Image (cartoon, rainbow, N blue to C red):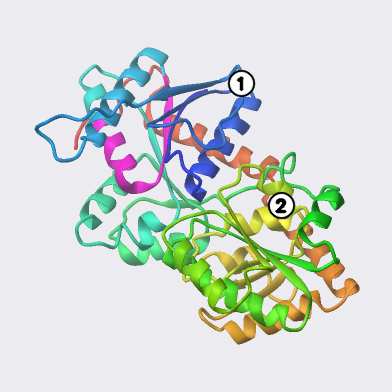
Amino acid sequence: MKIGIVCYPTYGGSGVLATELGLGLANKGHQVHFITYRRPARLGHFHENVFYHEVSNEDYPLFEYPPYDTALASKLVDVIRYENIEILHVHYAIPHAAVAYMAKKILLQEGRYIPVVTTLHGTDITLVGTNKTFAPVVAFSINKSDGVTAVSQSLKEQTLDAFPIQKDIKVIYNFIDFDRFRKSDKDHFKKAIAPEGERVLVHVSNFRKVKRVEDVIKIFKKVNEVIPSKLLLIGDGPERHNAEMLCRKLQLCSEIRFLGKQDAIEELLAVSDLFIMPSENESFGLAALEAMACEVPIISTNVGGLPEVNLHGQTGFLSEVGDIDDMGRNAIKILKDEPTLARFRKNAILQAKQFDLENILPQYEAYYEEILRTAVYPDKRVVNTTL
């Protein structure tokens, strides 16, 4: 298949999933075309089946803001037309699903029907989509997609509750590439971080309010009072300054490292003993899954798709949002001795294997084939040209 993929090329979960999915499809012989305004963060190496098309978004004196939606729609039409794309997979409802619909209607005038699959990732539904300004466009774009997927059962239910959706939504979970994310020997690295054999706790996010990074530091303080430990904070964003100020206030800066954005996250997870995710909402929890693949247990909140990933009492513990005391106690339970930590590590990797890329990728391939069968006749004539 020739597959077009549209995503946000950032460090967020939707961009990571889209990129890893595209690379996985390319490894299976499909031709994959990424169409976005910047090369995706994890698209770092040459691959014979991977192509990148940059969307130019020039400033015009007439517009206060560059018209990205229009530029993207035009680029989609161009790439689909000249690269003979068979199916378009857009990640994140706003604006990608809406733009894909515009491109589809333009191509219909040429007698070409391009099926569109939209994947919902979370904040496009739980934050952006429920904004009254965008809600009608989100609902329309989902209903006009040929296929719709969600990354967790929880997100599917939230979408159906929030919008008048007439399309069936198929749950295809996020996945993990075990060729990259796995436990590896990084003892020399760990000694540099924890020279006295301290436990290493880690948090990875984009440091937005919904991630509750200050809770991470408060949980760590409770652990550090009982167990010698270090905290690695990976990522960057608007809440970093507040987190740094809290670190200074609690006099924990000598035990905490702010590492900023990192590409080789797997190397840091390899030396970690516990992952902390106290988010207000998570549609799935991809960062937690990556940690589990590296045999790192999880302390998380009991929200969104997290209970589908982090099994309470087995791979870690679930607590209510803001319950710092409970999360601190649970962290200490896991870290208190080697046999307990080893048991949680084993359970984490076993659960993570359920989300192996090798298990999830065929689900996407089968779904593409289903959409292609139902969207066009065998001779490629248009099925439906009405709005």
Measure the C-alpha gap from mark 2 to mark 1.
26 Å
Q: Work out whether residue 337 or residue 71 is closer to the camera in this orientation and state it.
A: 337
Q: Which residues are magenta?
A: 85-104
Q: Amino acid at mark 1?
A: His
Query: In the orientation shown, which residue stands out farthest toward the top?
Result: 82
**Along the horizontal axis of the image, is 285 left or right of 123?**
right
**Along the horizontal axis of the image, is 180 left or right of 287?**
right
Residue at numbered disc 2: 268
- Residue 25, quarter of picture: top right
Rendering coords of residue 311 (x, y %) = 68, 70
Q: Is 95 one of the magenta-colored residues?
A: yes
Q: Which mark, by number, is residue 47? A: 1
Mark positioned earlier in the residue sequence (2 or 1) = 1
Q: Amino acid at mark 2?
A: Leu
Tell me whether the residue at label 2 lies in contact with that at label 1, contact meaning CB atoms closer than 8 angstroms.
no
Q: Main secondary structure of the magenta part?
A: helix
Residue at x 66% of width, y 53% of height:
290
Residue at x 85% of width, y 66% of height:
196
Q: Work out whether residue 124 or residue 56 is closer to the camera in this orientation and state it.
A: 56
Q: Quadrant of the C terminus?
A: top left
Rendering coords of residue 71 (x, y %) = 26, 29
Q: Is 222 situated above or below 178?
A: below
